Image (cartoon, rainbow, N blue to C red):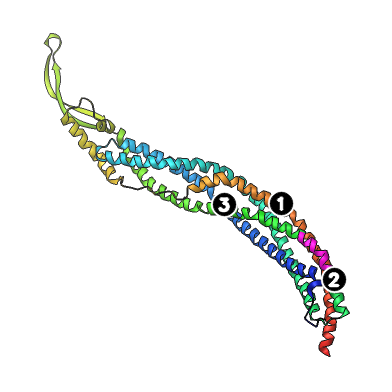
Amino acid sequence: MTVMGELDTSSDMETLKLIHDMGIAKDHTQQLEHKVELVENDVRSVYNELVKSKIVNNKLHWVNDSLATASQLLTVASIVPSISSQARNLKTVVDNTKIPINKAMLVSDKVEKLAGPTREKINNPILPNIRTVDNGLLVTMNAENGFLALFGVAQNCITTLHESDLRDDLRGRLEAVSSRLNPKLALFDGVQVALLNGINPIVSNMDSLASWTLQFEQINISLDAMLNALRPLINSLQALTAVFNRTITVPYGGYPKMCSKGRGRFRIYYPCGWVTSYFSFTIQQILTGATGVIAPIMNLLTNEMDKVLNPLLRALNLNISLPAIAGLAVLDSLSANLEPMVNGAVQFINGFAAEMTGFDTINKEFELVKAEVGDIGKACAEPNEGATMN
């Protein structure tokens, strides 16, 4: 014989199973909703950060072109003896820097071609379907909580009843409800488990994409630092090499000017002045060694050339270091993974959205039995209320 609160559970297996399995199903729904939110946050981050792909791509092209220009100018400037060694050394640094920049630029070209279509896929269908899924999951979570609360009230009430025909009747009715709902809940939660297994790699992939695209900002900062180092160098080198075609003219020696008077065989010639000789060479010719010019003339040419070059050389700083570009490796990761990862997300989220009919079905099942469970709880509460009044 059992008394109030000492309920033999051997006849309540379906009821207890339902309470147990509902707890698990509810936990699975909450996990799904949380992971869908993670995917949505990462997808929105990827969408926003991919705009910066174009900026990175443009700057990589600018840096690559700037390095090529600097290398060419340093080759030309290296004919100036006072900076020849420094110019050659810096040219080696520039050329070595250009190798990874050029590679990154080509990879960035591929990423940029993927960026636009990827943002379109995120905008539609990924984000609208995520909203559909998340809203559906919230509805199901509320339905589960509402049903469990009502079911728990009824089940707890029954355990407080003394052994009686009423208690047996209510237990039987609750067991019948549980028996009908258990297989439907098992089917529903089987779908949830499959979705959880499917969404885990999507969460991981979207997290990776979000992490990679967030590095665009750091790449941009590094590229700006590189451009800031190259611009003054290029400007100074351009100013220097621009004068290499300037002509330097110096006087050296000459010959007597001859005049004449008389006519025919009576014409005579006589010196009547002096003609100064001028020697003209471009600065580049002077730097590379003007052929056949004697040392005194070359000294004069060099002195005049130095008046032009020295102010430009003082403004030229070859003692610079080029900053490293952080984060370029993520471009390889994005080039290889952006399209397949996003396509995988599209496929999964589309499938998830299609599965929401199953969530609608279980929600309707909860609604169908809530009235019945409510009646059971009400029938149970009435004798308890009478006992309390007595």
Q: Residue at x 30, y 47 (%)?
A: 319
Residue bearing the label numbered 3: 209
Q: Is residue 242 visible?
A: no
Q: Residues within 10 Å of mark 2 (few under 14, many from 20)?
A: some
Residue bearing the label numbered 2: 372
Query: Residue 67: percent from the left, percent from the top?
Result: 40, 41
User: In the image, which residues are magenta?
Assistant: 172-186
Q: Nearer the viewer, mark 1 or mark 2?
A: 2
Rounded to the nearest whole Å, what is the CA distance between mark 1 and mark 3? 21 Å
Q: Residues within 10 Å of mark 1 (few under 14, many from 20)?
A: few
Query: Residue 69: percent from the left, percent from the top?
Result: 39, 39
Query: Residue 315: percent from the left, percent from the top?
Result: 29, 46
Rounded to the nearest whole Å, what is the CA distance between mark 3 and mark 2? 49 Å
Q: Height in image: 294 above or below 311? A: above
- Please, what secondary structure does the residue beneath circle 3 have? helix
The residue under label 2 is which amino acid type? Glu
The residue under label 3 is which amino acid type? Leu
The residue under label 1 is which amino acid type? Gly
Q: Looking at the image, is mark 1 or mark 2 earlier in the sequence?
A: 1
